[in-house]
Amino acid sequence: MPAEIAKIILKNKTLRWSSPLEFNDPFDIPREIAVNISHETLKEASASKFIELIENPPETTDHLDPRIKHLVDATKHKATPEMKEELIRKIRAEEFDPSQGENGLDMLRLMWRQMIPLFRILCLSERYDVISMWLHYADKYKGVVIELLCDDNLDSAWLIAKAVKYGKPKLDLFDASGWAELLVLPHDDRLNMMYDTLMYSKSEDWKYEREWRITSTAKHGETRTISDYEFDSREIGRIFLGPHINKTDKTDLLDIIDEFPNSTVYESNIGIGRNFTFTKIS
């Protein structure tokens, strides 16, 4: 972060948690879901998925939505080949819609649209020495990196951070077939998988960030798209000062650090091998 932001964070002992609406990357958490997917396209993809389950049923169906599970179990154990063919014919003739109708997708879209402003996300990195991160987020090497300490006794929020997965997610929610995979799951599993996929996956291009996230929702009565939540002074560990930090910011930060019992400060320099070197300030 820039040095000015670091001073505010350390003085106030608060960190800013943001809605995805505040994110600078439009390719990150989508503001809208299933934007280019029509009900007809989803119905066709869901029909193909359901036919696949009937023709090649899994060994166990416990992971499926109860309604889908019942039909797959019935055809798996009791149906004759003729009965299976008739069921598949009805699905193809659109006499049975496994996508749960237009309301199912519209309801998910509306729910997500309403939740986006209320989400509160803290984005962290597992590394303090990524050069591109210093360039992009720490004011072109004039800023600061703050280490957060996970403390069971303090019930640190960072203990529930989850690593972001980079590359193509297990479930492609930018495609109708991905939504069809989702809709055969039970309601709670469906929401959890949708949430995890949209919140904790990013393009391979961002892998250098080594990002971890903590997600929450706004507290009752909060109306903005940001929240400043307090942390304990004992949760601050090492503080790394950028190689180009100005003297005033350095002096200000060293004065503030006395309030943090577990904190140590490091100066950084750019080595001849195009890497950072860090030296503890006594």
Image: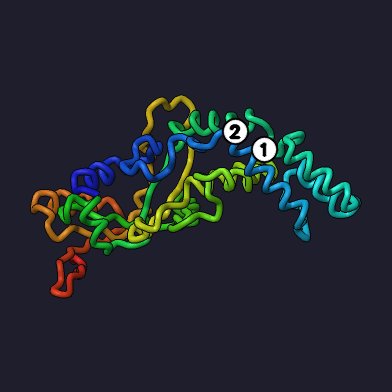
Residues at marks 1 and 2 touching, judged by CB atoms closer than 8 Å: yes
Identify the image quadrant of residue 15.
top left
Q: Is residue 243 visible?
A: yes
Q: Is residue 100 above or below residue 243?
A: above
Residue 120: where, in percent of width, then height? 43, 39
Mark 1–mark 2 distance (CA, rounded to whole Å): 8 Å
Which residue occupies 20% across, 70% down? Answer: 275
Q: Which residue is mark 1?
A: 99
Residue 35: where, in percent of width, then height? 48, 35
Residue 36: where, in percent of width, then height? 49, 36
* Three-letter code, disc 1: Ser
Residue 206: where, in percent of width, then height? 35, 56
Which residue occupies 43% across, 43% down? Answer: 29
Which residue occupies 49% across, 30% down? Answer: 113
Q: Secondary structure at mark 1?
A: loop
Asked if residue 157 lies left or right of residue 129, the reply is right
Q: Which residue is mark 2?
A: 39
